[in-house]
């Protein structure tokens, strides 16, 4: 039997955590966000977001235990990519999400990790801090190459072009 609790009134930052019967609103909050989640197959569990979670959890009022994730999304930088119909479209580059799957059967997913989308719809699923740092270094190295080699050669080629 589920006990439905009333929606809590806004609480001061130092108040005790509130327990809502529906998932909390999106966005980081000074109060720890908690809610009661009904589990598929029976039972319920109190879920609490880590401070950095900005997921709205609207779809997490019920479900399988393993399906819950907490996360924070960082949109990619838009690149004006050629599109035959539209001329150009803004394609996000290097979008990322800090994520944790607290009930995953994969230990590396039960701790915060990064999901990186180097390019839209292409994903590097579960990067540790060291792995993420290696990818950042690789991208930085590539940008240095583009500026130091390709850009420099383009400038020279334009200057010499007749
Ligand atoms: Zn959360």
Image (tube, rainbow, N blue to C red):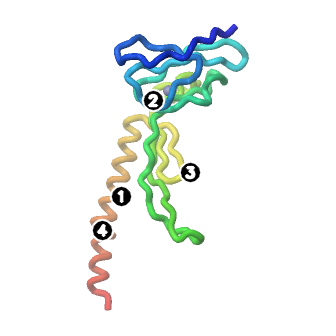
Q: Quadrant of the N terminus?
A: top right
Q: Which residue is mark 4?
A: 149
Nearer the N terminus, badge 4 or badge 2?
Answer: 2
Q: Residue at x 30, y 65 (%)?
A: 147
Question: From what the image shows, is residue 69 above or below residue 159?
Answer: above
- Mark sitting on residue 53: 2
User: Mark 4 CB in 8 Å range of ligand 1?
Assistant: no
Q: Mark 2 or mark 1: which is in front?
A: 2
**Distance (Cα) linking label 4 and label 3:** 29 Å
Label 2 CA crowd tier, 10 Å (few <14, some 14–19, many 20+): many
Eyeballing the image, is 71 above or below 3? below
Would the CB of label 2 be found within 8 Å of ligand 1?
Answer: yes
Q: Report the Cα–Cα distance between label 3 and label 1.
A: 21 Å
Pick whichever of labels 3 and 1 is earlier in the sequence. Answer: 3
User: What separation in Å lies between label 2 and label 1 (alpha carbons)?
Assistant: 31 Å
Q: Is residue 48 above or below residue 69?
A: above
Q: Position of residue 82 (x, y in %)?
A: 51, 68
Label 4: how many residues lie within 10 Å, few (<14), some (14-19) or many (20+)? few
Marked residue nearer the N-terminal end (2 or 1): 2
Q: Is residue 106 left or right of residue 150?
A: right
Say if mark 3 contacts mark 1, CB within 8 Å.
Answer: no
**Distance of mark 2 from mark 3, alpha carbons?**
22 Å
Q: Position of residue 66 (x, y in %)?
A: 61, 24
Binning the other alpha carbons within 10 Å of mark 1 as few (below 14), some (14 to 19) or many (20 upward) gives few
- Badge 3 is on which residue? 121
User: Are dots 1 and 4 in contact, CB under 8 Å?
Assistant: no
The label on residue 142 is: 1
Q: In front of the other: label 4 or label 3?
A: 3
Label 4: element kind: helix
Q: CA distance from mark 1 to mark 4?
A: 10 Å
Q: Secondary structure at mark 3?
A: loop
């Amino acid at each position: 039997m589920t006990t439905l609790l009333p929606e809590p009134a806004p609480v001061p930052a130092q108040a005790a955590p509130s327990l809502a019967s529906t998932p909390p609103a999106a966005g980081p909050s000074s109060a720890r966000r908690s809610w009661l989640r009904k589990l598929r197959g029976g039972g319920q569990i109190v879920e609490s977001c880590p401070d950095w979670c900005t997921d709205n959890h609207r779809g997490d009022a019920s479900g399988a235990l393993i399906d819950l994730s907490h996360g924070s999304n960082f949109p990619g930088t838009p690149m004006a990519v050629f599109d035959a119909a539209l001329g150009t479209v803004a394609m996000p580059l290097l979008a990322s999400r800090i994520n944790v799957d607290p009930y995953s059967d994969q230990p590396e997913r039960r701790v915060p990790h990064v999901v990186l989308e180097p390019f839209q719809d292409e994903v590097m699923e579960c990067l540790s801090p060291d792995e993420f740092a290696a990818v950042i270094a690789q991208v930085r190295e590539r940008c240095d190459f583009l500026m130091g080699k390709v850009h420099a050669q383009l400038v020279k080629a334009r200057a010499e072009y007749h």
